[in-house]
Image: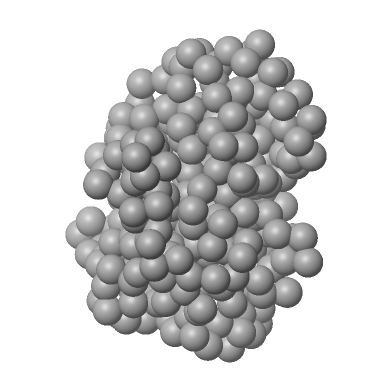
Amino acid sequence: MMLFIGSHVSFKSDSGLLGSVEETLSYGANAFMFYTGAPQNTQRSAIDDLKTYEGLKLMQDNNMKLENVIVHAPYIINLANNTDITKWEFACNFLRQEINRCNTLGVKYMVLHPGSSVGLDRNYAIGNIIKGLNNVLIDDDKIVILLETMALKGTEIGSIDEIKTIIEGVNNKKNIGVCLDTCHLNDAGIDISNFDEFLDEFDKKIGIDKIKCVHVNDSKNEFGSHKDRHENLGFGTIGFDNLLSVIYNKRLEDIPKILETPYIDKEIPPYKFEIEMIKNKEFNKNLYSDAYKYYKGE
């Protein structure tokens, strides 16, 4: 089984895609995900074509595939609520701009949080998401928007049944898929220790072929808590062995697995050491101290 494993990495205006690939390689990874700008605002720097070319060349030199590169749409985009029609139209236009940036970079997959109803009827809000996606997507788009499974915190939309309804309503079916998130599934009340049973249900409702990315995160929260707080691999309530069974599940073997686990002390990336754990299939209880020594030079 070929393992496509990576993490969230930075995408900076001065180094662009090249910097993202270099960071990925430093973690021993062959897949990665990034925001094309700050996730919490709409400010965007122009994409440096030279850095994109250099990044693609470095990927080629290291046998990295573009289909294992994921862009995450800014989480401020909310297609579910159209109470303020101007804001909703802006969200649609901003999502279109992000798709255009993906096209410039050559990236095929973009993860999108479906949105939050914020006081609206949930079915009506789901209709807004469908309408927004149909407004944004055009017939010759190569992008595939991956709706992320959510923890269902507050008024979040993103259960399997809700994602099924959205997919059914989108006109351009080739441009829509799903990103699973293990922390979100756990917090939404889906038992990761029975992951194959979940995949059976998913396959009946949506189809496993729609899954194009898996976010691999442990959870700080109890099962079904609807809280959405990520934890490092093996240090949360899901557990290392359960997460390993997701990563190495043969039904998802060609799909990139992306870590979004927290930095240690908010400054030290854990990904190099978590990826080693995954490759070795062995939990490292000294993850924090090993990463701290490595990056602090102690």
The extreme front residue here reads 298
For residue 132, side relative to residue 140 (left or right): left
Q: Position of residue 60 (x, y in %)?
A: 79, 31
Q: Would you identify the image quadrant in which residue 236 lies?
A: bottom left
Q: Position of residue 36 (x, y in %)?
A: 48, 29
Q: Would you identify the image quadrant in which residue 25 lies?
A: top right
Q: Would you identify the image quadrant in which residue 137 lies?
A: top right
Which one is nearer the viewer's eye here, 163 or 258? 258
Q: Residue at x 36, y 44 (%)?
A: 293
For residue 75, side relative to residue 256 (left or right): left
State whether residue 77 appears in this view: no
Q: Is residue 68 above or below residue 35?
A: below
Which one is nearer the viewer's eye here, 221 or 280? 280
Q: Position of residue 263 (x, y in %)?
A: 34, 47
State whether residue 230 appears in this view: yes
Q: Is residue 283 above or below residue 119?
A: below
Q: Is residue 44 above or below residue 109?
A: above
Image quarter in which the N terminus is found? bottom right
